[in-house]
Amino acid sequence: MNVSEALNLLKDKGYRYTGKRETMVRAFARENRYMSAKEILKLMQKDYPQLSFDTVYRNLSLFEELGILEVTEFKGERLYSLSCPESHHHHHIICTVCGKTQKLDLCPMSSIFGTPPGFNITGHKFEIYGQCEACSNKGVPHTHQP
Amino acid sequence: MNVSEALNLLKDKGYRYTGKRETMVRAFARENRYMSAKEILKLMQKDYPQLSFDTVYRNLSLFEELGILEVTEFKGERLYSLSCPESHHHHHIICTVCGKTQKLDLCPMSSIFGTPPGFNITGHKFEIYGQCEACSNKGVPHTHQP
DNA sequence: CTCTCTGCAAATAGTTTGCAGCGGC
DNA sequence: GCCGCTGCAAACTATTTGCAGAGAG
């Protein structure tokens, strides 16, 4: 998903196109990583010093609903990143320090066998965690430990 | 992990062996599923009506630290279950209604390739979600949606 | 001009912590 | 009797919601 796709999606669904929403989507596109509400608020406050958590949370929820953002959870905190443009199903390797992601084409569901009969599968999660090269070098402590 | 192993582990590490802790471990052993703090509190209050959330939370943290319990997160809530007795690495299929789990012997990490050079992998998560047969039949709404 | 978006303030849910007394060993 | 365990109350973190005014179309 890129910035204009995301903003068109908003318009198409009858939502307003605001500077804050554009800034938010652009920030996610530029950062290309998972971020918490706190992180995105901090980035956006460079443009909108008065911006509140409320708006951030409301827009995060909206964007998730529209499929503009993807979510994952570490230690009771929700982290968001721009949905991948690829239409085919895939997973991520995630830096637990900075939230940076890399796509993994492999999906373990393809080789699943022996699931209980009658069990109705509705979803799955496969994520690899660690420190990206840059963060390993910095020796920064993990902020997003799984 | 079974009840006596868990309780011996407590003793060995210098922690006290209390009725509440035993009841808690036994409840997890009996239920054999992921439970939230609220659920385990409710179960334990049959034996200890005065039991507080504080104690539940403190013991959940302690048991997690000792490897007696395993944790997973859905929708900003932590769910715990007794650690599996098997020493070899595996994953779970989890009912999002009742938290019941089933072991999956497959680990997708064995077929991983193309991870970024310099990326220091520290962990991974693979879970399959859905409704177990019993919960499908009941038509109960999901309480632990991923 | 209408209806959505936003900030403010307050509420909520899950969890953690300081303290003083109870309770294992 | 020492030191860990527990309940109480309060604090804390992440998140949600009601309301009234600002702003997009």
Image: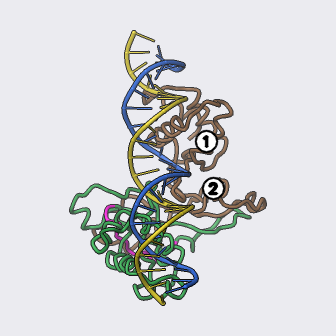
Chain colours: A brown, B green, C yellow, D blue
From what the image shows, is residue D13 above or below residue B52? above
Task: Look at the magenta stretch and give its main secondary structure.
Answer: loop
Residues flagged by tags 1 and 2 on a common chain: yes
Q: Can residue A78 be spotted in the picture?
A: no
Nearest the eye: B129 or A143:
A143
Residue bearing mark 1: A40
Seen at 44% across and 65% down, the residue is B54
Left or right, B96 with reference to A3: left
Nearest the eye: B56 or A104:
B56
Point out residue B3 in the picture as x, y percentages from the top left corner: 40, 85
The residue sitting at the right extreme is A137
Instruction: Find the magenta span and give its range.
Output: B97-107
Point out residue B48 in the picture as x, y percentages from the top left corner: 31, 72
Seen at 25% across and 58% down, the residue is B140
Give residue A22's mark: none
Sequence order check, earlier mark of 1 and 2: 1
Report, in whole angstroms, how far the alpha carbon at label 1 lies from the one at label 2.
Answer: 20 Å
Nearest the eye: A42 or D9:
D9
Mark 2: amino acid:
Gln
Point out residue B47 in the picture as x, y percentages from the top left corner: 29, 75
Q: How many marks?
A: 2
Tag 2, which secondary structure?
Answer: strand
From what the image shows, is residue B62 above or below residue A50? below
From what the image shows, is residue A146 above or below residue D3? above
**Disc 2 chain ID:** A
Mark 1: amino acid:
Ile
Residue bearing mark 2: A102
Q: Is residue A61 magenta?
A: no
Left or right, A113 with reference to D3: left
Q: Can residue B35 be spotted in the picture?
A: yes
